[in-house]
Image (tube, rainbow, N blue to C red):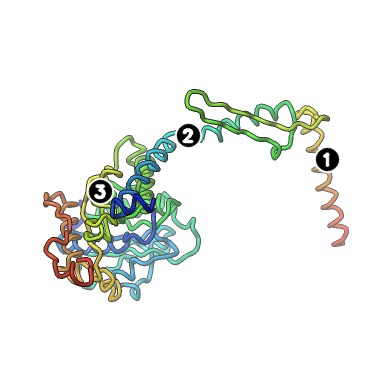
Amino acid sequence: MKDKKSARVVVVTSGKGGVGKTTSTAALGAALAHLGEKVVVIDFDVGLRNLDLMMGAERRVVFDLINVIHGVAKLPQALIRDKRLENLNLLPASQTRDKDALTEEGVAKVVAELRSKFDWIICDSPAGIERGATLAMRYADTAIIVTNPEVSSVRDSDRIIGLLDSKTEKAERGEFVDKHLLVTRYQPWRAARGEMLTIDDVLEILSVPLLGIIPESEEVLRASNVGSPVTLNNPVSPPARAYFEAARRLKGETIPMHVPSESRGIFNKLFGRKAA
Amino acid sequence: MNLLNWFSRGSAPIARERLQILLAHERNERHQPDLLGILREEILSLISRHISFDPDKVQIKMDRGKSVSTLAVDIEIPNSFAAAGDASRHRRPRSKRLRNDAARSMDQRVA
């Protein structure tokens, strides 16, 4: 099992902040690890790291990505193994304010080293289109574009798609990064009433194939409160199921996409109107 | 817009339409290099080779029409303009001398 692997490098990106990149990175990483894959999740949000918090590993951070890049620590020293899943690992971001701490060569070296040891390298991109975001996507084979069904998020996703097609190593070689759309915080009842963009609207506008639809759910907040990816914290909850399905699609399985709907939730229709 | 809202029940169709129009425009722009920026740079560097002028007093405007577009370059040139080549030949040594003077007076103060 050891070595001779060649990981798939996945970037989780969005342009806009607060749409669920870090939540999705943690949930998908844990789901893939649960499915038996060897996974490392990397936090690229230098200065504002949060993936450690989502994974419940914030008190175990000793060295970080920047330390490895600068040769202060060796890669195995910086990797944090998850306490629940032994094949899930985290490479945290540093809290330095120095934006130039991330270098292209440094990231290339770290990614190359990780490629031989893991099946999946999932890069959690910072928001925006600056250095951190372009470096997170730089060596990606696959991109997961996290989008909320809302105008500013869709617009920023479109911008990010443009960057994926021009600023990545693959794009510069004349190849394409394999792009997938992950719609998060979807509220089917709002979409049904014409108050929120529907999945079809978003797909038509962005024309990127759909990886999954994550319904808005209090389970996501609960999982982040306790520092556990939602796919581990409550694997049968609607968002966790949706993340598991997305993870299996990433692996190449064909799983029919079901758009969360309110058809069975007559109770919800009458009371509360809480999503899934 | 309120009326449209009222008829279609939700505001999502408006969001969809706004996005479609906006993104069509932005995608189009993305594929073009910053033409105005390039023109500005090249025109200014060409003119400054022959005439010295204040770069703040330059206006470059492009009006995009349906069939024809216009590019207007408006540069304010002082009446007593000198050839840029001469100006740089005169100016540079002078500024160096000024800097040297300043350095010398600093030295004296220290001494």
Q: Which of marks 1 and 2 is nearer the N terminus?
A: 2
Q: Image quadrant of residue B51?
A: top right
Q: Which mark is residue A180?
A: 3
Element type where label 2 sits in the image: loop
Q: Image quadrant of residue A187?
A: bottom left
Estimate the spatial distance between the alpha carbons at disc 3 and disc 1, rounded to whole Å: 62 Å
Element type where label 1 sits in the image: helix
Other-residue count near label 1 (Cα within 10 Å), few / some / many at <14 / 14–19 / ≥20: few
* Front residue of B94 and A183: A183
- Residue at image x 65%, y 31%? B44
Subunit of mark 2? B
On whether disc 2 and disc 3 are found on a single subunit, the reply is no
- Residue at image x 31%, y 72%? A57
* Quadrant in which the N terminus of chain A appears: bottom left
Other-residue count near label 3 (Cα within 10 Å), few / some / many at <14 / 14–19 / ≥20: many
What residue sits right under mark 1 in the picture? Answer: B94
